[in-house]
Image (cartoon, rainbow, N blue to C red):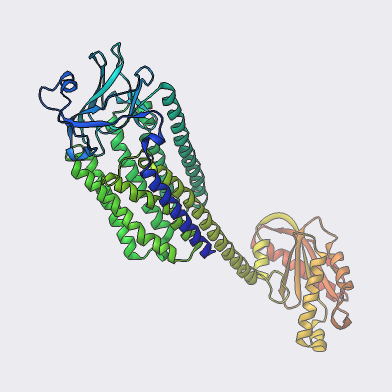
């Protein structure tokens, strides 16, 4: 089992690395509909006008290294457009933190048209996937070039990110694909959330609340990072972007707390537990700083978040190593579950640091990787529940066996006097108490010895079980005296017991008889039991005095 899990883990890790690298370096044109738009960048200078920018076209940086310019206001100029604006009438770009933007278009006749939005009404321009979509401004001529004036951007990922020209049909096709992607993730999160919440209500395992909190953060993160939350609520777009980071951090803190409780102290040494606590506090502090300070000092805050998320990535190594070394199947499944997030998190950190280019799928890889992690973690949870259930069942079996040994007569397997009284006292319904005593049992011991006498007692107990109806209480009260307690209407039981004893095959064909005393009454209290027992015992004495091997009755007063 363990080698198979290890091979599976290696295969999954290799597949995730290959897939993630392919995504990271995939061409945007291959992944999306429409035509990519090449852009150049320069800062807005006092006195700049769109007409002057279109006329001069000088001073632009076309290297693609936009982030080195830092925060501020920028002009972003497209290259010459060969596509007819009437055919590809929409411009899409990824949503970034900014105060607002104006898109200008220059027609082949030199006329300029424009359309603008700011952070407050950006939600009207959002499409699923958190893309800004703007219609190409048209001035009754063919559009030959585009120009963006972006105000107040932090420029931590770019100014105008991955712009594309596309038709209405292409836009709808992309919307449909992305809706299916996000809906699938949301459905998975909802199913995991509801099932684990139900398990928590039933089992009260300490790790379920943290797992549910993680899934809930991921669910809301998907709604926010997809742009859907902004489209529905009309919230400030910059606030939505800050919410993305907060929810992602919350999901990671939930995952850390889940791992601490799920793995426990046996699989997570105290030093690692202290480290997880420190990293969680550091991440929480970094997010609080981001929420309070951002968008001031964006580069410093972005690096702080980068260090915080990198610390959580480094934390995963000792946590997963401890889980793997535990040689517990569900702990190893947990380790496998984190293979995808670790792989893609490394690439996302590389993207955030600017070492690799921006990719929509890599930017949304958190959803894919955490979906895999949540699914594998659900499997690990199910496995752990199975283990806990088996351990609990084994403990219950031991407890039941111990109780049976404490409540039963070791020789005959019948109830002992204590357990018989515990079961008998407290029921106000009328009962029939039958006391049975083996006749001349001392002679049996003298004839067969104590071992033979014990065998007679075992056979005698078996005969009582055979004669008694289902649900009857049968006990060895001590020595050779036995008792049967049944509902009062079973008045034929004493004779039936006597007949069964007479027909029982005793060891060495020894003839064994018994005297039986019966009494009717209730046993609501211990005092009632004393009264009923004395009456039955008196009837038993009458049977002995009358010659033994017979039944006698006395009704309780």
Q: Is 318 left or right of 57, judged from the image as shown?
A: right
Question: Is residue 157 visible in this depiction of the protein?
Answer: yes
Can see residue 206?
Answer: no
Residue 6 in percent (x, y) is at 48, 62
Q: Residue at x 77, y 76 (%)?
A: 458
Relative placement, left or right, of 452 versus 394 is right
Q: Indicate the position of residue 223 as horizontal and vertical percent values.
A: 39, 35
Which quarter of the rendering shows the N terminus? bottom right
Q: Is residue 196 above or below residue 174?
A: below
Q: Is residue 143 above or below residue 321?
A: above
In the image, taking residue 70 as reference, residue 476 lies left or right, namely right
Task: Please name whichever residue, 103 or 241, is drawn nearer the observer in this view of the structure.
Answer: 103
Image height of 169 relative to 382, above or below: above
Percent position of residue 8, x then y: 50, 58
Specify the quadrant of the image occupied by residue 556.
Answer: bottom right
Considering every residue shown, the one lying at the far left of the view is 46
Nearest to the observer: residue 173 or residue 33: 33
The residue at 82%/81% (across/down) is 440
| Residue sitting farthest toward the top | 140
Q: Quadrant of residue 237?
A: top left
- Residue drawn at the location 40% of the way across and 36% of the way down: 30
Q: Quadrant of residue 95?
A: top left
Q: Position of residue 143 (x, y in %)?
A: 29, 18
């Amino acid at each position: 089992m363990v080698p198979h899990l290890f091979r599976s883990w290696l295969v999954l890790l290799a597949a995730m690395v290959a897939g993630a690298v392919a995504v990271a370096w995939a061409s945007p044109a291959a992944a999306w509909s429409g035509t990519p738009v090449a852009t150049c960048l320069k800062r807005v200078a006092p006195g700049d006008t769109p007409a002057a920018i279109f006329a001069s076209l000088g001073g632009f940086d076309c290297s693609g290294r936009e982030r080195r310019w830092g925060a501020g206001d920028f002009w972003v100029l497209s290259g010459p457009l060969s596509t007819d604006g009437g055919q590809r009438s929409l411009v899409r770009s990824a949503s970034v933190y900014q105060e607002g933007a104006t898109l200008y278009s220059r027609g082949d006749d030199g006329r300029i048209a424009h359309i603008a939005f700011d952070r407050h009404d950006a939600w009207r321009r959002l499409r699923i996937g958190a893309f800004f979509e703007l219609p190409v401004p048209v001035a009754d001529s063919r559009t030959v070039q585009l120009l963006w004036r972006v105000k107040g951007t932090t420029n931590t990922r770019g100014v105008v990110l991955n712009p594309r020209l596309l038709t209405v049909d292409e836009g709808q096709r992309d919307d449909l694909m992305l809706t299916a992607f996000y809906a699938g993730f949301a459905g998975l999160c909802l199913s995991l959330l509801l099932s684990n919440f139900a398990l928590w209500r039933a089992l009260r395992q300490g790790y379920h609340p943290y797992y549910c909190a993680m899934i809930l953060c991921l669910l809301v993160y998907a709604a926010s990072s997809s742009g859907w939350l902004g489209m529905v609520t009309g919230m400030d777009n910059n606030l939505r972007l800050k919410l993305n980071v907060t929810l992602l951090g919350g999901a990671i803190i939930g995952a850390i707390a889940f791992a601490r409780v799920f793995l426990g102290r046996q699989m997570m040494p105290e030093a690692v537990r202290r480290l997880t606590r420190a990293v969680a506090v550091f991440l929480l502090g970094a997010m609080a700083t981001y929420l309070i300070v951002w968008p001031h000092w964006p580069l410093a805050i972005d690096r702080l978040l980068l260090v915080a998320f990198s610390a959580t990535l480094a934390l995963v190594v000792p946590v997963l190593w401890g889980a793997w070394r535990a040689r517990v199947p569900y702990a190893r499944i947990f380790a496998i579950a984190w293979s995808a997030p670790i792989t893609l998190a490394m690439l996302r950190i590389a993207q955030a640091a600017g070492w690799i280019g921006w990719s929509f799928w890599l930017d949304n890889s958190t959803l894919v990787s955490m979906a895999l992690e949540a699914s594998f973690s659900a499997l690990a949870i199910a496995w752990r529940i199975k283990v806990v259930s088996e351990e609990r069942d084994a403990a219950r079996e031991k407890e039941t066996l111990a109780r049976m040994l404490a409540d039963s007569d070791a020789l005959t397997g019948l109830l002992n006097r204590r357990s018989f009284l515990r079961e008998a006292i407290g029921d106000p319904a009328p009962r029939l108490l039958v006391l049975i005593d083996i006749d001349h049992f001392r002679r049996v011991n003298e004839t067969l010895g104590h071992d033979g006498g014990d065998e007679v007692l075992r056979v005698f107990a078996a005969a009582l079980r055979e004669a008694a109806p289902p649900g009857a209480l049968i006990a060895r009260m001590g020595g050779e005296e036995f008792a049967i307690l049944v509902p009062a209407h079973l008045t034929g039981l004493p004779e039936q017991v006597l007949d069964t004893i007479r027909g029982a095959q005793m060891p060495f064909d020894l003839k064994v008889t018994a005297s039986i005393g019966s009494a009717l009454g209730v046993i609501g209290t211990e005092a009632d039991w004393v009264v009923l027992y004395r009456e039955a015992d008196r009837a038993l004495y009458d049977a002995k005095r009358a010659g033994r091997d017979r039944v006698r009755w006395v009704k309780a007063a």
